[in-house]
Amino acid sequence: MCRASGRRKTFPLRRGERIGSFRIVMPVISILPSSVADQIAAGEVVERPSSVVKELLENAVDAGATVIDISLEEGGRKLIRVSDDGSGMSAEDVPLALARHGTSKIRKAADLVGVPTFGFRGEALPAIASVSQFEIETAATDGEGTSTKAVGGQIAPAEQIARRRGTTVTVAQLFYNMPARLKFLRSARSEWRSAVEALTALALTHPAVRIHLSHDGRNALTLPPVASIRSRLAAIWGGRYAEDLLDVDDVAGPVHTSGLVQRPADVGTSARRVFLAVNGRAVRDAGIARAVEAAYRSTIVAGVRPSFFLNVTLPAEAVDVNVHPAKAEVRFRDRWTVERAVETAVRRALGTLDSAASLGFRGSSFSFRPFEPPPNPDSEILRPQIDRDSPLFASDAGSGSNGHAEYENVGAGQEVAAPAQPIPILFQLRRTYIGFEHEDGLVLIDQHSAHERVLYEQFVRTLESGAAPAQRLLLPLTLHLGPAEGEAFDENREYLERLGFEVEGFGGHTLIVNTVPMPHPRFDAERCLRETLDSLTGDRVAGAAAKHERLAATVACKAAIKAGDELSQGEMRSLFAALRDTTLPAHDVHGRSTIVHLTWDEVERRFGRR
Ligand SMILES: Nc1ncnc2c1ncn2[C@@H]1O[C@H](COP(=O)(O)OP(=O)(O)OP(=O)(O)O)[C@@H](O)[C@H]1O
Ligand SMILES: [Mg+2]
């Protein structure tokens, strides 16, 4: 209390205010009433109806539910009801569940490491109850349950009810007591969409749980229990969508990456969908999303982004789950390792032939191994035959193992690969495609795209590691360039030289080319150099790796054999072998397929045989 002297002063007094020679030093800090504190805390956990859906679904799964029923009205703005057949709660536990920090899931700070449940804070129910008209009906054993209501966090005495084991939480009029929040809710339609997203995330992490969703009294979605994420996706977006996705399953050090990603040929053809779980918990993570995109480098065109559904598993102590108010993000102890592991896993999947564009059922993957008919002693024709001396497409000698799991036993390069992996009978169609028969169908290879992939990988290695063998021209070429091409040449000179173009400047933008690369005998060096410089004009990329890749892709495209070039058997075989040795044989460098697989299933379906 202050003692004022002289003039009487009326309250309230403000800090710092002077009365005579006294200065007011009243405390300005006061503890908020718990109802206000709860509302503020609730604001962190509950942002919109979908946050309530997420928390209630997670509680149901934590309680061991096998069946979950969700009803929404007006996208959840009016009502959200989640019922489960999980463990339920005893009458004594309900008030604790509704109190802040009331949780059955952890007891001490150390339990936070590797917590196996979604929940651990004891925040969700009190937060939701403080900003809605709330009711929880629950029973730990069939028949004996309780019903507890709360309005704006004020809990009414529980009533006894008869119900089956499990829990039903009803959340009506969310934010009815928080006008500021209410104002920020979107239309019923967009809240509904967000709620469905929350539900989808849980449905994908828990395919074995039966889920039923209704909206405004109408049945919206029924998901039967299934064994895999692929089957779940099929139930949500249709069998065709799920079938078209490619399996990822790879362990790198402590990180296991599994799930499904889009085939490069399909990227950009439908709405992008992204799902990521870390140790079974659905989270957002821009870094991992970027790592997935990085894995698609050179297999898709710039500007499109792949859909993916991935689960990353790693030791519990390597992840902190307690870093985000809505548990929507996690923190990695070693983010770099995780991102690289995900990138490698996806890259490996894209390196399989299964990632090629395929017409027909994709359950059975195919390989480069030829079709083996029943043994016929008269037939010599399927014996491995390789023209060791055909220089046209030889994969480069120093390439070493490409790190591709499928070929690891094969060792380095074509020389070793040949005896281990026979080459099928190849035939050329329209002077554009190389075809062969395979156990599961007919395979067509685009000769230009395939050669482009082969050259691209060779050129990238050359640019990274040194110079390629070049051919000295008897009569040097003279090229007159426009200013833009000249500039493109100056920018890329060092790299072009490494590829084998040894050039002298000759005043202005006239170049004298003394040596050229020799990727194959039909190579038109002058045309390649001109076209390369033309497509490099005005195009600046930062970073040496990106430059290498850009230049390698451009030169590969210009240097590769074209559609319309007739190929001999030997040439087709060596192209086939070289393609097989690349890291991403099924994809060219512009986002197109090098290989199309027409399955016998599809052929038979079209001929009405099945
Ligand atoms: N559907 C349910 N079935 C059975 N028990 C439940 C259910 N929902 C909540 N509970 C119990 O109530 C407690 C409090 O739930 P609440 O969601 O508030 O916190 P939490 O799940 O422990 O942690 P978090 O705040 O991180 O979600 C839970 O720990 C659990 O014991
Ligand atoms: Mg919870």
Image: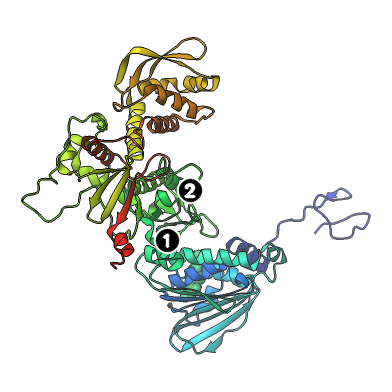
Residue type at the position of mark 1:
Tyr
Q: Is residue 573 above or below residue 304?
A: above
Residue 12 numbered tag = none
Q: Is residue 404 left or right of residue 588?
A: left
Q: Which residue is at the front of the view, 122 or 247?
A: 247
Q: Is residue 107 visible?
A: no
Looking at the image, residue 286 sits to the left or right of residue 498; the answer is right
Point out which mark residue 305 bears.
Answer: 2
CA gap between label 1 and label 2 equals 16 Å
Q: Quadrant of residue 147?
A: bottom right
The count of marks equals 2
Comparing 404 with 153, the one in front is 404
Callout 1: few (<14), some (14-19), or many (20+) C-alpha neighbours within 10 Å? some
Q: Earlier in the sequence, mark 1 or mark 2?
A: 1
Left or right of 380? Residue 313 is right
For mark 2, give the secondary structure: loop
Task: Identify the element where label 1 is drawn.
Answer: helix
Q: Residue furthest top?
A: 507
193 versus 390 height, above or below? below
Q: Is residue 401 left or right of residue 49?
A: left
Q: Which dot, 1 or 2, sits closer to the camera?
A: 1
Residue drawn at x 66%, y 63% as measured from the top left: 186
Residue 10 x/y as whole percent? 89, 60
Which residue does the numbered mark 1 point to in the structure image? 241
Residue found 86% across the figure and 60% down from its top = 11
Q: For this rendering, which residue is in front, 610 or 101?
A: 610
